[in-house]
Image (cartoon, helix red, strand yellow):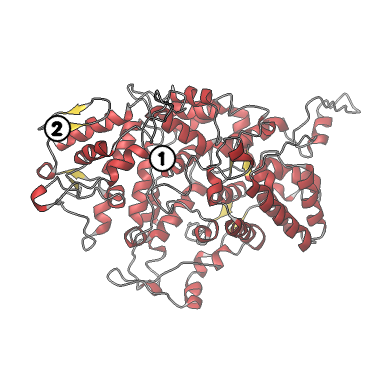
């Protein structure tokens, strides 16, 4: 069996790294077009259907499509959620999700925050670190009912990026949770409100250095920081090149792409973002001071200090002018509105979200249909935009498996969450789902809010060499896929599915007092302290009755995890591996492991 598993690992490496899309035609797992099944008894007209499906469902095709829909709109779903979405219809399911209140990360972090800080190894300081954000993030994403909001917020976190690369973000968990919460709050709201909240976020201000950004003082060679002014245009709103309404690039009379802004424009915008600093009740203007109560400083949005704001005239884009003498808040509000309504923003943000949720290569027509719902000048919100992305005919195309240009590589965080949400996980005795991805970033190149830079884990236009680039297509997620990360991901999946040893394998756990440098605690003592937190179990009850019927179980798991796209070749490999195991639970774990590393599963179609 080890040889077969090794062969399967080599198969996924060669298949995924090559970037080739394959077309398969097969019968089973819902592929029953033009197949007639006749039952021997007329008294039970649907018994033949049940026989070919392998397990009793109303309509296997509907379940496959519902599984695929939920793979695009959530971090994954159990079979009960798949059946519910199929029964409700997708638009009704979306409307129900829109009506649910947000489940905030900071609330969870503060409720269970001292998970690390109260341990003896951490001097009992109760200090909320980035590890606490990790715990709160996964707890919410495993337990909260607002599945769509959580998934959209994660997509936004890869467009308007911060990370934990500095000691500040590592040491102060609420810096990350508070920022993530504003993405959750605005996931279904208006874009200009989202952009304003991101701009005023103390976490973003610290990350992109416009916190305490002073106006120009030429006598003392002081100039406004240009970092945020550049990124709010390049990454958060309009992009680098002028776009048509369908997201394609415009050309000038010489056939060259047209830049959206110049260095001179960046300098003008930088003046707008002067004067923002500590938003606390007793706050003062100045750079971020790590000697102060850093948690309090990031919990409130930055406020404008007009004495430090540049009140000169500012030339924005397309002839827009901010007159001299305005308050900082007036300049800021008009600039946010200016960027939100720029003709580039609708197609740029629409295409970015499409690529995060459904497909790396949307057609121009798909992008335009979504961008038409952006409505920056109206009272509209992201709800119609999200519906347009997920309900578009291109996204709901029944022939998706045969369209080699449609789909996207499932990124590591999404893959791991697919599994955890498919099989409900029991929390420890404190109600916490201790973060099970401690090693995910180092082994796979990705974890929530841990992108290496403001440019995210991968560039939106990345195209790996080979068949994808030769056809002028892109596959952004492939940028973090290399031989090391593929093996790392396989190992992470093996830990989670077969060994289930995650909570016994901490990669980065540090002990520190707030005023001291972190130090590594004794590993054995630390793990002993974590015993009370490491008791979690996966619930396989719904599939347990199928363990003795490999074909039926694989068909079930195919719908649950792979949206019905497993090939006969993959199914045969899984069955052969199962036959060589004795324990029923081992058979199930091996089956889920092999599905999760299969090339068929790797691409979300």
Numbered marks: total: 2
Residue corresponding to mark 1: 102
Work out whether residue 95 can be spotted. Answer: no
Residue corresponding to mark 2: 313
> Vertically, is 171 above or below 249?
below
Residue located at (29% from left, 44% from top): 228
Helix, strand or loop for disc 2: loop
* Image quadrant containing the N terminus: bottom right
Q: Any mark on residue 297, and which?
A: none
Separation (CA) of disc 2 from disc 1: 40 Å
> Vertically, is 311 above or below 575?
above
Q: Quadrant of residue 245?
A: top left
Residue located at (14% from left, 29% from top): 323
Work out whether residue 104 can be spotted. Answer: yes
The answer to whether residue 467 is left or right of residue 154 is right
The answer to whether residue 326 is left or right of residue 37 is left
The answer to whether residue 572 is left or right of residue 412 is right
């Amino acid at each position: 069996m080890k040889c077969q598993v090794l062969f399967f690992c080599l198969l996924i490496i060669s298949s995924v790294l090559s970037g080739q899309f394959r077309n398969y035609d097969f019968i089973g797992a819902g592929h029953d077009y033009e197949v007639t099944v006749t039952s021997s008894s007329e008294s039970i007209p649907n018994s033949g259907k049940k026989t070919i499906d392998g397990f009793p469902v109303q309509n296997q095709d509907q379940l496959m499509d519902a599984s695929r829909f939920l793979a695009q709109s959530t971090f994954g779903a159990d079979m009960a959620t798949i059946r519910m979405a199929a029964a409700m219809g997708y638009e009704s399911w979306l409307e129900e999700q829109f009506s649910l209140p947000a489940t905030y990360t900071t609330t969870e972090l503060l409720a269970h925050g001292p998970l690390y800080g109260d341990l003896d190894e951490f001097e009992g300081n109760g200090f909320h670190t980035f590890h606490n954000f990790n715990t709160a993030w996964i707890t919410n994403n495993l337990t909260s009912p607002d599945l769509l909001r959580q998934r959209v917020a994660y997509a936004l976190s890869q467009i308007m990026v911060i990370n934990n690369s500095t000691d500040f973000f590592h040491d102060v968990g609420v810096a990350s949770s508070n920022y993530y919460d504003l993405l959750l709050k605005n996931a279904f709201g208006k874009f200009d409100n989202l952009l304003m909240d991101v701009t005023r976020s103390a976490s973003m201000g610290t990350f992109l250095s416009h916190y305490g950004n002073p106006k120009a003082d030429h006598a003392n060679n002081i100039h406004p920081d240009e970092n945020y002014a550049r990124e709010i245009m390049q990454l958060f709103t309009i992009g680098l090149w002028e776009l048509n309404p369908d997201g394609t690039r415009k050309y000038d009379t010489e056939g060259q792409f047209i830049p959206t802004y110049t260095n001179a424009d960046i300098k003008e915008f930088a003046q707008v973002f002067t004067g923002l600093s500590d938003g606390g009740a007793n706050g003062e203007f100045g750079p971020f001071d790590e000697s102060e109560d850093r948690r309090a400083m990031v919990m409130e949005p930055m406020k404008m200090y007009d004495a430090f704001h540049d009140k000169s005239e500012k030339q924005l884009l397309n002839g827009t002018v901010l007159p001299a003498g305005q308050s900082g808040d007036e300049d800021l509000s008009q600039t946010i509105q200016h960027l939100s309504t720029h003709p580039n923003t609708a197609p740029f943000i629409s295409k970015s979200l499409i690529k995060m949720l459904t497909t790396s290569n949307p057609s121009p027509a798909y992008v335009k249909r979504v961008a038409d719902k952006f409505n920056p000048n109206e009272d509209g919100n992201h709800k119609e935009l999200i519906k347009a992305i997920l309900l578009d005919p291109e996204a709901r195309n029944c022939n998706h498996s045969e369209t080699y240009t449609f789909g996207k590589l499932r990124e590591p965080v999404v893959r791991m969450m697919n599994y955890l949400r498919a099989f409900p996980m029991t929390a420890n005795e404190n109600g916490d789902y201790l973060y099970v991805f401690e090693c995910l970033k180092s082994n796979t190149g990705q974890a929530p809010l841990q992108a290496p830079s403001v440019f995210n884990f991968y560039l939106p236009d990345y195209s790996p060499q080979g068949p994808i680039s030769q056809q002028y297509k892109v596959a952004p997620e492939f940028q973090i896929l290399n031989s090391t990360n593929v093996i790392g991901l396989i190992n992470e999946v093996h830990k989670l599915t077969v060994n289930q040893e995650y909570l016994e394998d901490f990669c980065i756990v540090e002990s520190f007092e707030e005023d001291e440098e972190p130090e590594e605690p004794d590993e054995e003592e630390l793990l002993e302290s974590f015993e009370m937190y490491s008791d979690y179990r996966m619930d396989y009850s719904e599939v347990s009755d199928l363990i003795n019927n490999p074909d039926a179980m694989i068909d079930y798991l195919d719908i649950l995890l792979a949206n019905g796209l497993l090939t006969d070749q993959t199914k045969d490999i899984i069955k052969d591996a199962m036959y060589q195991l004795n324990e029923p639970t081992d058979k199930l774990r091996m089956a889920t492991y092999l599905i999760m590393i299969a090339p068929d599963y790797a691409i979300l179609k």
